[in-house]
Image (cartoon, rainbow, N blue to C red):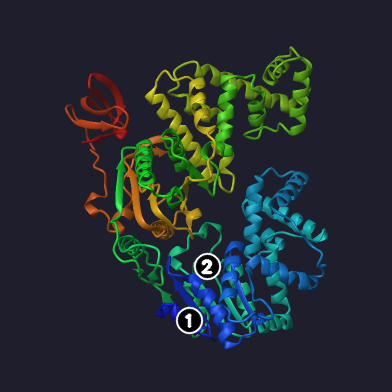
Amino acid sequence: MEQILNELNPSQREAVEHIDGAMLILAGAGSGKTKTLTARLAYLVGEVGIDPANTLTLTFTNKAASEMRERALKLMPTKVSYPPLLCTFHKFGLLFLKFHIEKLGRSNNFVIIDSDDKKRLLRSIAKALKIDLNLSFIASEISKYKNSLLTPEVVLEKAELPDYKKVAKIYEQYQANIEENNLVDFDDLLMLTYRILDENEELRRETSNRYKYIMVDEYQDTNELQFRLLEHLCSEHDNLCVVGDDDQSIYGWRGANIRNILEFADRFENTKTVKLETNYRSTEPILKAANALIEHNSTRLGKKLVSHKGEGKEIKLLHSLDESMEAKAIAHEIHDLIDSGVDPDEIAVLYRINALSRSLEEGFTKEGLAFKLIGGMRFYERAEIKDIISYFRVLANPHDDFSLVRIINKPKRGIGKASIEKLQKAAFDVHLSLYEYIEQSISGKLPSVVSKKVATALAKLVEDIQLLRDEAKNALGNFITLFEERIKLKDHYAAMVDGFDRILNIDEFYGYFRDAVMKNPDLTLDEFLNDISLQSDQDQIEENAITIMSIHAAKGLEFEHLFVIGLEEEFFPLLGEGSNMEEERRLGYVAITRAKSDLTLCYVDSRFYKGRRKMIDKSRFLGEAGLISDTSLKITKSSAFKKGDLVKHKIFGIGRVQAANKSGKEYKLLINFGGNKKEILSSFVQSI
């Protein structure tokens, strides 16, 4: 055991050798927290002589639990008679309920339902109650209620807004149904465990006395229910050791409560705090920027990472005109790295919002660069994008039955599966495409096989399709505006739990379409569809490829060569309703500390925003990290334009203003781009 202890740095060893009493291990990025946790578990069992059956170590993922268990057992000097319990919170809940769920009057042969089963049950309940709400929204709200320990009765009493009253009614029926059928959902594994411990004092004492030494990994990610559960597990002792990093708390949007780690020392008396500040992953320039950035947060416990590696390459800033130029520049740099012998697996590109992956996917494909997208679907595979493409295909070719079936009830028009099947059969019987049959049935040329309500909805759909088909025959400059006005896909997706991300994806697609039309005013819908088909049909290469992923998905990973894109105001930090600047800054800290030796931060002059191209400012994070001077934070923009001014446009390049007329808050400019004159609004150009 002494050899193991000698391999630890002083802070790690201090944490390992602390036995009794609460302890908070503030483990900075790359500071060896897993090594410390496993060494401490081995020390408790192998050196102190604690019975492994009296230990409990909780993690958030099965992968982390498996890795820690394997490493801890290797460190123990002798074969243990009983392996220590090292598992996820939910696995612990399952094991506990198998022994004690009868305390709630239920048998232990319960069945755990997955998210698909849960949605099927919610769908049937909503249908019976004649409630038309998005299923993902309902499921998410019920999950929030359970993790906040709110019963259906309490929710029914407190609900005020109409939609939440409906969710409360569904929650009541849902809970009654799963209890009646002895079912348990994922959230119940913890909620019911807490309830049993809360309502049974003797069992609570017995359980707490059994698990006398408890450790928790990634404590900054715990929610209120998990904290309350830990309180019960420690009701007879205070031997709770938690490991986490408040600077990496980035899951507030899914219920993580940063107060759990910030207030740990207040909630548990005589807490010992140990800071792991030696970073074994990154070089000093990378950590210098990370430290400088996170110090701008006021709500933190405070620590400063120091590089074990020492000096290294300075962080590079990559400035591009727009997202397509950014993707091209990154692709060229990556090609150079690979040509120099770098393994593609050691290279990654991170982004704050999923919508930004489109330009990377397109650019890398054009440049022949193999990539794998982690933690999400490729842009053109996302449901909302496939819906728009299906609409476009129907507009280009109404006889595309497959695409028409996909969008016939999106947004919801009250056209159910049974009605669609009747329409398909009727069309097949008379040898017509589905659209042709619908057209002729609503005109009275063929008999209708659906109800009047459905027929009315179909008539409106045909009207919209015909109007948009007529518009598509002309120049496509105003096509997207009319498309969204008539179809309202954004309204359809806004009601979903992940509606914000989906709308960002839709806006990115709309912006890309508008950009394509600006580049080629004669573009047709067929040509546009053919272009994106070439991009979306590329084989997804998993082996020997670089990685692109969101910052959230990258947490816990590390890469030798790292690019982070979108370092602009409104994108990173993401600004808007409900945004949390300190959590945005923590995301920046997480992104920077994924890099081992080579970090490039990227920003552009213009990007699509809410479906339109917009000139944007560099991210304040670049200044806060000490990478640019405060005076360079703003992109120079002229508030007034006059004849003779030189300007730069992302597509047409540099030109000279021939005329400038005030138009609302901006100017309508006539610009001469090398003999090619264009009329452009001032928001689309930059003074030089």
Q: Is residue 84 above or below residue 527?
A: below
Q: What residue do we see at 75% from left, 50% from top? A: 121
Q: Is residue 633 above or below residue 25?
A: above
Is 271 displayed left or right of 238 in the figure? left
Cα gap from disc 1 to disc 2, whole angstroms: 27 Å
Q: What residue do we see at 62% from left, 19% from top? A: 398
Which comes sooner in the sequence, label 1 or label 2?
A: 1
Residue beneath label 1, please?
A: 3
Q: In front: 409, or 111?
A: 111
Q: Residue furthest left?
A: 644
Q: What residue do we see at 62% from left, 34% from top? A: 411
If the image is split into quadrants, where does the C terminus sit? top left
Residue beneath label 2, please?
A: 218
Is 523 displayed left or right of 201 in the figure? left
**Residue 183, percent across and down?**
78, 59
Q: Secondary structure at mark 1?
A: helix
Q: Quadrant of residue 315?
A: bottom left
Tell me, yes or no, whether the two marked residues, 1 and 2, touch with CB atoms within 8 Å.
Answer: no
Is 405 displayed left or right of 28 in the figure? right
Mark closer to the observer (1, 2):
1
Residue type indicated by callout 1 = Gln
Residue type indicated by callout 2 = Glu
Is 501 displayed left or right of 330 in the figure? right
Q: Quadrant of residue 434?
A: top right
Q: Does residue 128 show up?
A: yes
